[in-house]
Amino acid sequence: MTEYSIHSDLQLARQLADMADSISAERFRANDLVVSMKPDMTHVTDADKAVEAAIRGGLADSRPRDRILGEEFESTDAADADPRRQWIIDPIDGTANYVRGIPVWATLISLAVDDVPVLGVVSSPALGRRWWAAVGQGAWTSERMSANETRDRRICVSRVTSVADASLSYNSLKGWDDAGKLDELVALSRAVWRTRAYGDMWSYMMVAEGLIDVAGEFDLKPWDMAALVPIVEEAGGLFTSVGGTPGPWQGSALATNGLLHAAVLEFFA
């Protein structure tokens, strides 16, 4: 099997994010945006499909033997695909926001090796922000300062050690209710300092930046989470399911600054 460095894989992911941003930003708030509903009753737009198709094309050229898991298209892995390497793509995380003209959405790109996400890029052109990380290389963000200038900086989680001092983003009450965990969430919300529902990828990036301390939700797919995992973890936090299992494969997410993780998990035991 071909060996690629984590540095070259991350560089490729960031290049793919540049391409994705050019497509998604151009279609954002477009009067002729084509919107339809998928069988699971979630939105999909022509931008979602165009972004994923472009990323898949870029990967086919640069990493032809790597497997791909994306939200909008079925996998078409090569016959001689590398079983260890899989790119995981959410072309537009927050499509409902995208459709309504709300700027909280992003393209999520991750590479998992042996089912462990080793790099992630979260690119949000409408917010003028991008976050990225790779194992052993720390977590970073860039912020657009002007049309021709961006500023990069390394990020880290907060040092809050008490649940009573923590800020929590829970995303959706209905999601917790549908999962049978609403009472537990309410108990946690009463125990923490502050609660908000920032939503989608933004909550987890704020955990990674140390702006909030806990984020979680249910009803998620691997492409919703895979890119978030290395960013949170390289920033010093922890990312598991609400049940405490590491990784993006269990249908739920709980991200914390690490110091609070065990205490928060106790609310859902």
Image (cartoon, rainbow, N blue to C red):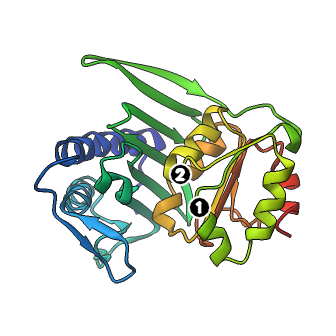
Label 2 is placed on what type of residue?
Gly
- Reply above or below: 212 against 69: above
Residue 188, given in percent of the width and then of the height, sits at 82, 56
Task: Choose top left, top right, bottom left or bottom right for residue 123.
Answer: top left
Q: Quadrant of residue 248?
A: bottom right
- The residue that label 2 is drawn on is 199
Q: Nearer the viewer, residue 188 or 119?
A: 188
x, y (%) of residue 227? 49, 52
| Residue 2 visible, this angle | no
Residue 45 vs 153, above or below: the answer is: below
Secondary structure at badge 1 equals: loop
Of 57 and 173, the residue lying toward us: 173
Q: Is residue 217 left or right of residue 53?
A: right
Check residue 172 in the rendering and tell me which mark sits there, or answer none. Answer: 1
Q: Residue at x 47, y 37 (%)?
A: 131
Q: What residue is at 56 percent from the left and 41 percent from the top?
A: 205
Query: Going 32% across and 68% down the picture, which residue do you hit?
Result: 43
Residues at discs 2 and 1 in contact (Cβ within 8 Å): yes
Q: Residue at x 36, y 30 (%)?
A: 128
